[in-house]
Image: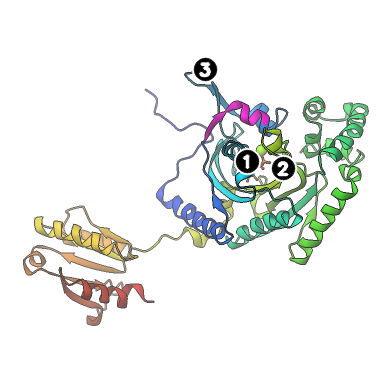
Amino acid sequence: MDNLKNLRGTVDLFPDQLIKWQNVEKILLEQLSRASIKEIRTPILEMTELFIRGIGEGTDVVSKEMYTFLDRGERSCTLRPEGTASVARALIQNGISSNPLQKLWYMGPMFRYERPQAGRQRQFHQLGVEFIGHDSVRSDVEIIVLAWDILGKLGIKELNLEINTLGDTNDRSNFQKSFLKWLETNKDSLDLDSQNRISKNPLRILDTKNLQTKKVLENAPRLFNFLSEKSHNRYLDLKRQLEVLKIPYVENFNLVRGLDYYTHTAFEITSGALGSQATVCGGGRYDDLIKQMGGPNTPAIGFAIGLERLILLAGKELEIPRNTDIYIINQGLIAESLAMDLSRKLRNYDLLVELDLSGASFSKQFRKANKLKSKSIIVIGDDEAVNGEFTIRLFDQSGNGNENEEEVISFENDIKLENWINNNLLVK
Ligand code: ATP
Ligand code: MG
């Protein structure tokens, strides 16, 4: 039989790699909690219809990238490709009106059937933030600043913020009429993919990566010129507030984002350090989504950060594992049980304690403690078991022992143990 393998576009993560993931996640959670944003968890598996209605049939995600299958009850199910539609569904189902203003975050795996490459997988992870019920320009600014500061806190360099406005539904349909006319006359100069989008999702053509089409599009009508005065002023206000906060931005009139539900503000944060999959964060306002999905009229704005790309970008210092504080070398029947008991006691302090379970010779266990660069060691053998006391000592890598850094402590003397820990391991 062939060896079993993981599916293409999925990855296994091992302890050494997960140090960085855990450190990054810790910083993310701290930042979110400091901004008083609350977590929401929704199922990974949803009815397919949720994404068709929520994201839009003409989008790449829905038309080409979804993992969709029939379950045993013949219901069409989809592994979520993004988080916003599920959050909207959960809130509508739970009755938004009882809690109309919410700041929420979610984190977890998403699934898209794409061509895997560096920073692009089929199972990947996103951190998303959604401000529900907020319609002020200030909420747009806070969302952008939040994403910007999170990336800054992780030490990510060469960040670029691109912004655009998509206007409201009215502005867009006015633009679309004129854009469609233009597309029909210029159809033959467009790439095939874009030609196909004319009937399905014309706005997405603006987002094309095809250089020839990009060039042709330079002469197309601009959504910007179809904005109502209100939408236009909203956009000017956004820019002004970003300037006050000294957040540098670049305007990109072709930034339309892949999903159908965006209105007004759309933004992306890229990093020059990432190569071709440069977008770390994408976000925007989606004032009509919740109503379209059957909920009350509820404006909202959010963003999603791709964690794999974040990990590629975050600093090397986040890869450094935490040091072992105490390594417990132990051997012998009673000694081993005393050691187990002591390890439980020690773990009540904020210490990383490793209990050697090998039963190997003292010298072997000693070498392991040395290799781990444990800050201190405890040795428990038959003598210690008989005497009812053990020695704890700072593990001196240089070999120059210092008597003050070692202490004989009875198994019952918790106060002495605590003092030694406080003086030698916790301070510094
Ligand atoms: P891209 O243009 O890179 O395909 P997107 O517009 O499809 O991105 P969004 O749906 O806005 O991406 O998702 C937000 C973020 O999630 C992206 O900026 C990226 O960091 C990350 N992301 C999206 N798709 C993938 C993927 N297949 N693998 C890894 N990360 C991804
Ligand atoms: Mg994509």
Residue at (92% x, 34% y) in the render = 178
Relative image position of residue 175 (x, y in whole percent): 88, 37
Determine whether the residue tagged by mark 1 lies in a helix, strand or loop. Answer: helix
For the image, the number of numbered tags is: 3
Query: Viewer-proximal residue, 314 or 103?
Result: 103
* Kind of residue sitting beneath label 3: Glu
Residue at (44% x, 54% y) in the render = 19
Query: Viewer-proximal residue, 292 or 70?
Result: 292
Tell whether label 2 touches label 1 (CB within 8 Å). yes
- Mark 3 — residue? 74
Q: Quadrant of residue 98?
A: top right
The crowding category of the residue bearing disc 3, from other C-alpha atoms within 10 Å (few below 14, some 14 to 19, many at least 20), is few
- Mark 1 — residue? 84
- What stretch of residues is rendered in magenta? 44-53
Relative image position of residue 331 (x, y in whole percent): 14, 58
Indicate which quadrant contains ligand 2.
Answer: top right
Determine whether the residue tagged by mark 3 lies in a helix, strand or loop. Answer: loop
Tell whether label 1 touches label 3 (CB within 8 Å). no
Q: Quadrant of residue 150?
A: bottom right
Q: CA distance from mark 1 to mark 2?
A: 10 Å
- Mark 2 — residue? 286
Determine whether the residue tagged by mark 2 lies in a helix, strand or loop. Answer: loop
Farthest residue in the left direction? 386
Q: Who comes first in sequence, dot 1 or dot 2? A: 1
